[in-house]
Image (cartoon, grey):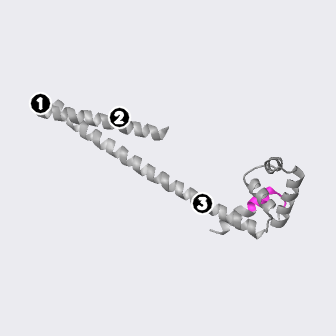
Amino acid sequence: MPKFSLYFQIAVGAGCVMFFVADVIHDMVVDAEYTVHFYIEACFAILLSIVVAAQFVQLLVLRKNHLELIEKLNESGNDLHRVVEAQFARWNLSTSEYEVATLLFKGFSASEIADLRGTAVGTVKAQMSAIYRKADVKNLAELLMVVIDRVYDDR
């Protein structure tokens, strides 16, 4: 909603700028009277133009920063994926163990993994034990820490 709000503010501000500038031009051409009212109106039209332009520039900067952050986030996700893949390869996981490990990393429980893979919970638990043995850890928390440590070691 904030993005829409900023677009709306800029659009309303631009409309006001057009109104005031048109009114100032009208006063200059038709009335040709340069009263205090005219100068105040002209000053505020200029100030409003500057504010709207600044908001537009701010919007462009925010959009650029947003796109850069998305790119960095994608790069980080790709880096993490490469680290996880490399770690799985080091552990020589079988195809089934690889699938189970991937689902564990995504936060699924043994019963959820069994449902997703159409296997028995006991089979998944056996695969989890094989993964833990190959990774030389005792549980999921240690498994995750091994990979997280590897992410920081690679930096």
Q: Amino acid at mark 3?
A: Ser
Residue at image mark 2: 12
Residue 141 figure quarter: bottom right
* Other-residue count near label 2 (Cα within 10 Å), few / some / many at <14 / 14–19 / ≥20: few
Q: Earlier in the sequence, mark 3 or mark 1?
A: 1
For marks 3 and 2, give the CA distance: 39 Å
Nearer to the camera, 115 or 37: 115
For marks 3 and 1, give the CA distance: 62 Å
* Other-residue count near label 1 (Cα within 10 Å), few / some / many at <14 / 14–19 / ≥20: few
Across and down, in percent, residue 81 comes to: 66, 61
Q: Is residue 120 above or below residue 96?
A: above
Residue at image mark 3: 76
For marks 2 and 1, give the CA distance: 26 Å
Tell me the residue at 36%/37% (across/down). Answer: 11
Q: Amino acid at mark 1?
A: Val
Tell me the residue at 24%/37% (across/down). Answer: 45
Residue 91 on the magenta segment = no
Q: Amino acid at mark 2?
A: Val
Magenta stretch, residue numbers:
138-145
Residue at image mark 1: 30
Q: Is residue 39 above or below residue 123?
A: above
